[in-house]
Amino acid sequence: MPLRAVAFDVDGTLYPNASMYLRSVGLVLRHLRLFKAIEKARIQLRENPDLSEAFERVQGRAVGEILGISSEEAQARIEEVVYTRWYRVFTVLRPYKGVSECLESFRAQGLKLAALSDFPIRGRLDDLGLGPWDCAFSTEDTGCLKPNPQSFALLAERLKLPPGDILYVGNSHRYDVLGAVAAGMPAAHLTRRPVRGTQAVLEFQNYRQLGEYVLRRLADSGYNSGGRVSD
């Protein structure tokens, strides 16, 4: 199938997780119980999503039960500590080497660009100096965290493309690759350790390799620089 769009996970894919951990260590240590509770709650919600109400309420209730506080207090803590204070880290983070050039190359080829993260996007992509995007949203908007295929299906719907025309790029085989493949999307895996029996169409270690792969795909499908099939 032709390649018409490239979509990206954010955390650990567009920027190094190590940089984020280094910048966040003080905040995480001060609120370690909260971060552990969020991690535990999200594991539960990945396996058993609750679509009866907004994700922030579902997550708040789950975190509140773990910490022994009300769901309202849990929601307030998550908003203040994670979605406000932790998000300030992004103002000093830098993307992986080659990301900006890779995105510009894809735009020049007429490809649509999208981002799908398990955490709210808000201003994080702007803080990383990346954009513009044709589509950018969080799996929280659907109530279904990765690898649930529903969020990937919504990504295809918002891009107005068949899933098979979208290459999804992520750093987690379990969440990004398997989730995308379950929704009918080919996936590229950013990793230094190849996964045995991988379902990714590409395993790559740097963005030069990703860029070369995408350009080969476009050439093989007969696309010109305007994103149209050549005669």
Image (tube, rainbow, N blue to C red):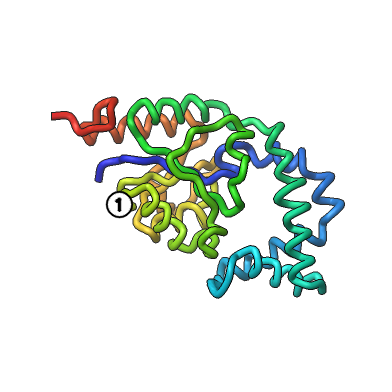
Residue topped by disc 1: 162
Residue nearest the viewer, comparing 141 with 228: 141
Residue 94 in sight from this viewpoint:
yes
x 39%, y 30%: residue: 106
Tell me: residue 46, above or below residue 28.
below
SS at mark 1 in the image: loop
For residue 70, which quarter of the picture? bottom right
Residue appearing at x 80%, y 70% in the figure? 67
Q: Amino acid at mark 1?
A: Pro
In-front residue for pair 24/61: 61
Q: Does residue 149 appear to the left or right of 120 in the view shown?
A: left
Instruction: Classify residue 55 as left or right of residue 142.
Output: right
Task: Give residue 63's position: percent from left, percent from top.
Answer: 73, 68
Measured from the top left, where is residue 79 in percent x and y? 73, 55
Which residue occupies the foreground of this view, 125 or 194?
125
Q: State which quarter of the image contains the C terminus.
A: top left
**Residue farthest along the right direction in this orientation:** 30
x and y percentages locating residue 172 in the rendered image = 54, 51
* Residue at the extreme left of the image, as rendered: 231
